[in-house]
Image (cartoon, rainbow, N blue to C red):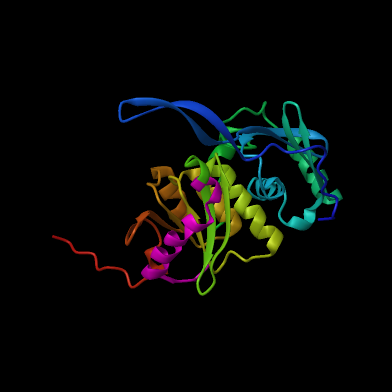
């Protein structure tokens, strides 16, 4: 990608301090609370409007790149010719210009749309795309149980916005012997993962030897995005959905969830997690 990134005007801060009437121990007083900002973010490709989402107005270059990658609009960072971030009175436009060949592919995709957008999944045009298969992750990397525990324990150190507001999700990437190499936060869990994927693409960090960490439940969309990244393992604090488990199994991804403290549960492709506790059948 060229160095054409520029920002017109100023971006809103990722959080704001607001006043509230706080009731504590039977007493009411005026308090100040830090809350996350939520802004309308519009994605345009080649001058064509593609999607609008509510998101935290931070790490927007990462967001644009990660979104384009996980939605299959590009296959590599080099296919973005330029990117502009334009604040407006109504929100922020992420204006992406694609390389010539990729722009032609994008235009063909738009012409073949079966109907208007509006699905709850980002950037898709039909029910068929909602159930689209994810790339298969054939990575043979293995991780110890201790690595899972260590990785999840490291995630809070990168959650500066959540420490301030206690109200945003995070997606992180952890590598053995190096620890937490990247974290991105957002009010939306999908947005946080897109931002992380964009950050890894920009840094050239390979996903093959690390673990994606999530602070949310693991739904099918998050599995689809992680598969596009090529991540062999996902570890999450919360519970996965049944559809997420099915897609992780089909995509070759090891899905670790309910990872809290020393405990976690492995739902798919257990062979990547070594030194696991023995499974006892009564």
Quarter of the image with the C terminus is bottom left
For residue 41, side relative to residue 140 (left or right): right
When the figure is inspected, residue 208 is found, relative to residue 129, above or below; the finding is below
When the figure is inspected, residue 236 is found, relative to residue 191, above or below; the finding is below
For this orientation, the residue located farthest to the bottom is 177
When the figure is inspected, residue 267 is found, relative to residue 96, above or below; the finding is below
Q: Residue at x 49, y 39 (%)?
A: 167
In the image, 12 versus 242, the foreground residue is 12
In the image, 169 versus 21, the foreground residue is 21
For residue 10, side relative to residue 27 (left or right): right
In the image, 15 versus 271, the foreground residue is 15
Q: Which residue is drawn at 39% across and 64% down?
A: 149
Q: What stretch is highlighted in magenta?
A: 137-163
Magenta segment main secondary structure: helix
Task: Give x and y (percent) for residue 214.
Answer: 48, 51
Q: How many marks?
A: 0
- Is 140 magenta? The answer is yes
Quarter of the image with the N terminus is bottom right
Task: Give x and y (percent) for residue 59.
Answer: 67, 48
Task: Give x and y (percent) for residue 108.
Answer: 78, 39
Task: Give x and y (percent) for residue 154.
Answer: 46, 61
Q: Can residue 134 be seen in this view?
A: no
- Is 204 magenta? The answer is no
Q: Is residue 78 visible?
A: yes
Q: Residue at x 54, y 69 (%)?
A: 209
Quadrant assignment, res 278:
bottom left
């Amino acid at each position: 990608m060229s160095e054409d990134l520029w920002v017109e005007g100023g971006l809103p801060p990722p959080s704001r301090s607001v006043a509230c009437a706080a009731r504590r121990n039977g007493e009411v007083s005026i308090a100040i609370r830090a809350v996350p900002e939520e802004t309308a973010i519009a994605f345009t490709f080649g001058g064509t409007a593609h999607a609008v989402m509510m998101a935290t107005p931070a790490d927007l270059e990462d967001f644009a790149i990660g979104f384009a990658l996980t939605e299959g609009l590009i296959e590599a960072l080099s296919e973005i010719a330029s990117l502009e971030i334009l604040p407006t009175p109504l929100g922020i436009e992420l204006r992406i210009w694609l390389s010539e060949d990729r722009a032609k592919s994008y235009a063909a995709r738009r012409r073949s749309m079966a109907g208007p957008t509006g699905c709850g999944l980002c950037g898709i045009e039909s029910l068929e795309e909602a159930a689209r298969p994810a790339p298969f992750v054939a990575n043979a990397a293995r991780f110890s149980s201790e690595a899972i525990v260590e990785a999840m324990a490291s995630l809070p150190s990168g959650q500066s916005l959540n420490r301030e507001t206690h109200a945003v999700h995070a997606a992180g990437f952890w590598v053995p012997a190096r620890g937490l190499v990247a974290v991105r936060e957002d009010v939306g869990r999908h947005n946080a993962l897109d931002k992380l994927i964009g950050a890894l693409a920009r840094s050239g960090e390979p996903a093959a030897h690390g673990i994606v960490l999530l602070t949310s439940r693991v739904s099918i969309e998050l599995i689809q995005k992680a598969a596009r990244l090529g991540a062999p393992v996902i570890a999450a604090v919360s519970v996965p959905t049944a559809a997420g488990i099915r897609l992780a199994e089909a995509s070759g991804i090891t899905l670790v969830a309910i990872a809290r403290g020393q405990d976690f549960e492995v739902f798919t492709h257990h062979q990547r997690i070594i030194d696991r506790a023995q499974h006892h059948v009564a």
